[in-house]
Amino acid sequence: MRARDFAIGGSPIEGDGRCGTTLRCAMSRESAFIARLRAIAGHPAARGLQDDCAVLPMGERDLVLTHDMIVEGVHFLADDPPEDVAWKLVAVNLSDLAAKGAKPIGVLLGYPLAPDEAWDACFVAGLDAILGRYEVTLLGGDTVRANGPRSFGLTAIGEVPSGAAPSRSGAKAGDGLWVTGSVGAAGLGLEVATGRRAPDAALLDAYRRPIPRLAEGRQLGPLVHAMADVSDGLLIDARRMAEASGLAASIALEAVPFHAAVGADRAARLAAATAGDDYELLFAGPADFVPPVPATRIGGFSEGAGLTLSDQGEPVAVPDHIGYEHT
């Protein structure tokens, strides 16, 4: 997703930790803020804010908790149907649970009342549709009256057997890097939604109504070394997994399962690999790993740091922009 949980790897901050400390490292404002939050997120369930979910031990089961927000003009368009906005809000949170192999239990909604009741009613209809689709319960939340662009928050709660939720930081040197499904449809769907591409209902749905890979996540969770969803872009999410694991990652562009509409042009494939909103699962497994779900090996992990790209064996420069980050 465009917005991130408090889970992005970042460089250390130089200074004494007091308000007003200068950030003397190259990091986004978002990463700098998250780095500050790590100092007060001391509970082991927080996983050092290196993951998209908190994992709270509860005896034989662990609770998995995540919270994502979507904002008009950032994650959805002002004229997107309210039913689709509701769908996307829930789907992106369930996608985080999928990346931990969790079974959803319920959600808590933060909702700003719209100026017109009809919009609210359509949003509720969309909310009911996706909650029913994935057999998830609305547990509660909060409503406020707000002006300006709409902004929604959702907390999703799931469960896994004790110790079974893979982290983003568990990749090992020699592991393969895998991804489910295909990459790039949602980015093209945004072009459709903004009139930059000819109408295409399937691509538009990929952008507005992503499908969380819950079943695949539950099968992969107990078997993989690390897992995350592809929300901000394949390249940036692969680099985040490598950084969290203290490793280098490599991706072979010719191996990436791009959506057919992306085409073969390298620039188009790089754009698709950085567009985000795919909500596929990105995971690390041993060199001889055979995934129990349809997935494609696109690269691997090794000792070192950073992200490298190749295409048909030829080195490819990593783009300056590799995915979405809040400035």
Image: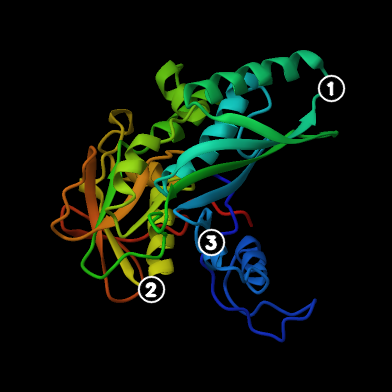
Identity, as a three-letter code, of the amino acid under mark 1: Pro
Q: Which mark is residue 8?
A: 3
Residue 81 appearing in the image: no
How many C-alpha atoms fall within 10 Å of the one at disc 2: few (<14), some, or many (≥20)? many
Residue 35 location (% of width, % of height):
62, 70
Q: Which residue is mark 2?
A: 246
Which structural element holds mark 2?
A: loop
Q: CA distance from mark 2 to mark 3?
A: 13 Å
Q: CA distance from mark 1 to mark 3?
A: 35 Å
Is label 1 in contact with label 3 (beta carbons under 8 Å)?
Answer: no
Q: CA distance from mark 1 to mark 2?
A: 48 Å
Q: Could you say which is closer to the camera, residue 203 or residue 247?
A: 247
User: Which residue ends up furthest to the bottom in the rendered image?
Assistant: 16
Residue drawn at x 57%, y 63% is 46
Which structural element holds mark 3?
A: loop
Residue drawn at x 16%, y 48% is 290
Which structural element holds mark 1?
A: loop
Residue drawn at x 42%, y 60% is 168
Q: Which mark is residue 115?
A: 1
Q: Which mark is residue 165?
A: none
Relative to residue 151, is residue 2 drawn left or right?
A: left
